[in-house]
């Protein structure tokens, strides 16, 4: 990856984004669709941190203009793969003589992401495995890319986001991206999760193959399945089984082990022919301290009690509110939106009225941004939970959130 050319292109995309934001600030009408198309084309080719940031932003579709959010969401499912010639370079760097290890490697990837892509391969013993290949040269340009990403993120100040918050988000993003380049750590996570859930018949986690893995390639046994985003056509029993397995797994991860899968886009999950949940990617696993869990449960407890003062107290403890004058009316409206999801009995996640009611509050949220800010150390956690929520929506999950939340809310006290 040529650093100078990448820097120029990233600066150009940042300038175009800034121009659109400035136009709206001055009362004009930006062409968000055209901006989104330009970002998709540019970032799809450049890969790396900027593409990852755009993927993160695409999950904040309640805060972005719809046309821009729709185009950025394409980066989750339609990003152009890196040419095979470049991927082959990475494989040769790892293995030397590729033919010594594999009888065949499929040149077309069956998964592409911001930091690497996945190719099926066949060993000389006839076993089908997958190779997660880091984009060649990405580690070398990561830090210079991050400098440009930090500059782009400064645009957030136009929306009253304090610089300290932007710095905290950048630090969290940078740490996450550096972690995703550590394939040894991901192999360790796969092994840890396989041991942890070996007795859960509803979960399948691919086995890492250390003998074929290295710094830039992670080899795993191939586990075939139907991608989560395609399960909308599956029968209801299959979808509900996968949804309950996903919800139970997230709950156990967070409240028993203090960890969370932090890259929840739908391509990282699938269902096998037995209806089991397959968890493909453990490149982004974050630790969640007990104190943070307690603070979140205090906020949820106050929200479900329709207690605006309690919500404000919880947000103050989390560092999510500053300045004078709590936006109590906004808290009250937010509680009215969220509480129905936790009403007794099964709630249908395909009924997205909760989300759309919250989306209607977005202008009021922006108006309160001088006092109300997302807690810096929970931004990645919040994004992950939001992504898992939307996976449950895609599955049309029916869950009794009231019953599920009773033991969890005890953590608030």
Image: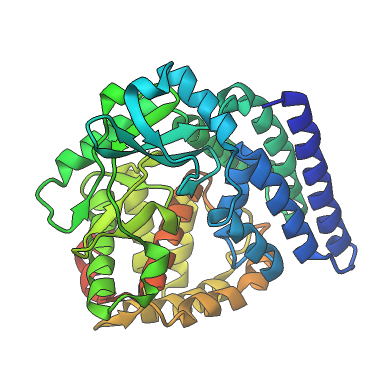
Query: Which residue appears farthest toward the top when viewing the image?
Result: 96
State the image coordinates of residue 383 (x, y, percent, origin top left): 48, 54
Relative side of 15 to 66, left or right:
right
In the image, is residue 259 above or below residue 189?
below
Instruction: For residue 186, say whether it is visible.
Output: no
Looking at the image, how many numbered discs can be counted on the residues?
0
Relative side of 202 to 118, left or right:
left
For the rendered model, the colour scheme is rainbow
In the image, is residue 70 above or below residue 199?
below
Tell me the residue at 72%/25% (across/down): 3
Q: Name the foreground residue: 379 vs 75.
A: 75
Q: Quadrant of residue 386?
A: bottom left
The C terminus lies in which quarter of the figure? Answer: bottom left
Tell me the residue at 54%/59% (across/down): 59
In the image, is residue 157 above or below residue 400?
above
State the image coordinates of residue 104 (x, y, percent, origin top left): 38, 35
Instruction: For residue 118, say whether it is visible.
Output: yes
State the image coordinates of residue 187 (x, y, percent, origin top left): 31, 31
The N terminus lies in which quarter of the figure? Answer: top right
Query: Which residue appears farthest toward the left when viewing the image?
Result: 199
In the image, is residue 14 above or below residue 124?
below
Q: Name the foreground residue: 249 vs 294.
A: 249
Q: Name the foreground residue: 382 vs 350.
A: 350
Q: Quadrant of residue 143?
A: top right
Q: Quadrant of residue 214?
A: top left
Tell me the residue at 27%/34% (across/down): 208
State the image coordinates of residue 82 (x, y, percent, origin top left): 59, 39
């Amino acid at each position: 990856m040529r650093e100078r050319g990448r820097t120029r292109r990233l600066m150009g995309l940042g300038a175009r984004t800034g121009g659109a934001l400035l136009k709206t600030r001055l009362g004009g009408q930006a062409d968000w669709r055209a901006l989104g198309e330009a970002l998709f084309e540019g970032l799809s080719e450049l890969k790396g941190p900027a593409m990852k940031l755009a993927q993160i932003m695409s999950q904040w579709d309640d805060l972005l203009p719809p046309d821009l959010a729709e185009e950025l969401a394409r980066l989750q499912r339609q990003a152009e793969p890196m040419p095979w010639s470049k991927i082959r370079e990475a494989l040769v760097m790892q293995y030397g003589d590729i033919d010594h290890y594999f009888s065949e490697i499929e040149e077309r990837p069956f998964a592409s992401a911001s930091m690497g892509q996945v190719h099926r391969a066949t060993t000389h013993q006839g076993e089908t495995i997958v190779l997660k290949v880091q984009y060649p040269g990405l580690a070398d340009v990561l830090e210079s890319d991050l400098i440009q990403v930090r500059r782009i993120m400064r645009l957030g100040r136009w929306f009253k986001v304090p610089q300290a918050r932007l710095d905290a988000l950048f630090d969290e993003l940078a740490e996450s991206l550096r972690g995703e380049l550590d394939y040894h750590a991901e192999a360790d996570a796969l092994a840890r999760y396989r041991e942890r859930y070996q007795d859960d018949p509803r979960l399948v986690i691919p086995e890492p193959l250390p003998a074929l893995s290295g710094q830039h390639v992670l080899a795993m046994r191939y586990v075939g399945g139907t991608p989560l985003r395609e399960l909308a056509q599956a029968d209801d029993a299959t979808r509900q089984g996968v949804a309950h397995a996903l919800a139970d797994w997230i709950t156990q991860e967070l409240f028993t082990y203090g960890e969370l899968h932090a890259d929840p886009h739908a391509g990282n999950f699938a269902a096998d022919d037995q209806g089991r949940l397959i968890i493909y990617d453990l490149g982004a696993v974050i630790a969640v301290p007990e104190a943070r869990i307690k603070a979140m449960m205090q906020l949820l407890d106050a929200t479900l009690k329709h207690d605006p003062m309690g919500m404000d107290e919880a947000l103050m403890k989390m560092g999510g509110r500053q300045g004078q004058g709590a936006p109590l009316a906004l808290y009250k409206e937010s509680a009215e939106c969220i509480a129905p999801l936790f009403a007794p009995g099964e709630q249908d996640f395909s009924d997205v009225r909760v989300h759309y009611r919250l989306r209607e509050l977005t202008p009021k949220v922006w108006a309160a941004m001088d006092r109300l800010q997302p807690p810096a150390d929970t931004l990645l956690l919040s994004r992950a939970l939001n992504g898992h929520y939307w996976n449950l929506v895609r599955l049309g999950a029916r869950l009794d959130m009231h019953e599920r939340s009773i033991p969890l809310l005890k953590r608030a006290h």
